[in-house]
Amino acid sequence: GNDMKLLVAIPHRNFVSMFWARALRTLKFPEGTGFITSVEYVLDVTRDMLVYEALQDGRASHLLFIDDDVVPLDPEAPLKMAQLMESENMGILSALYFAKKPGRKVPAAWCRAFQKPNGTWMYNPVDPDREKTGIVQIHAAGLGFCMIDLGIFKSLEPPWFYWKKNRL
């Protein structure tokens, strides 16, 4: 069906590269997609502010975070993700993208490896060579290009995002 009403949420740092701006312009979104932006103070707080805004607006059913440093290779990515979210009845769908670090490409997607005696989990990044196509079920994802059903936020108490260095 086409019940999805998408709102694109862009946390930013006031300035974006022309490369990113041009890439954003080529993306194809479902009809009627809206856009909201917020200047990034601290990224987790900014994401919370964008979710509050989306929930208060009330018109959208889904939020697509696009960070100001993530450029999808496929201009159809937002459309394909929206179709997948609906057909597979998913609550969260993140595109597979890679950290901007020197050396081997490490995807911003992780699976639980093992549980430590204190109850916390250790995670391993998804192997990008093994997961070239299709849907991969994971335990943690980067939010740089991530679509989320807003109903999830309605069922949880804020703050919805919390980030601490070296904590997955």
Image (cartoon, rainbow, N blue to C red):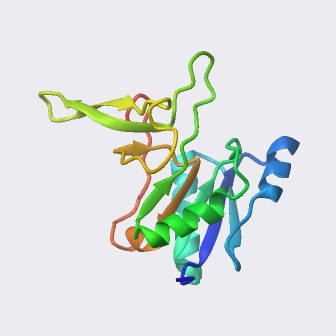
Which quadrant: the C terminus? Answer: top left
| Residue 62 in the image, given as x and y percentages of width and height | 53, 71
In the rendered image, residue 99, in percent from the top left (x then y), is placed at 58, 31
Residue 22 picture location, percent across and down: 85, 50
- Snapshot quadrant of residue 152: bottom left
Whether residue 17 is visible here, answered yes or no, is: no
153 relative to 79 in the view: left or right: left
Vertical comparison of 94 with 155: above or below: above
Q: Nearer the viewer, residue 144 or 81?
A: 81
Describe residue 25's horizontal placement relative to residue 83 as left or right.
right
> What's the residue at 46%, 37% (across, down)?
131
Residue 26 seen in this snapshot = yes
Residue 101 horizontal/vertical position (percent):
61, 23
Q: Quadrant of residue 125?
A: top left
Q: Residue at x 41, y 46 (%)?
A: 136
Residue located 36% across and 45% down the image: 138
Figure label count: 0
Q: Nearer the viewer, residue 2 or 57?
A: 2
Query: Which quadrant would residue 13 be assigned to in this image?
Result: top right
- The correct choice, above or below, for 50 with respect to 16 in the image is below
User: Could you tell whether 106 is left or right of 156 in the image?
Assistant: right
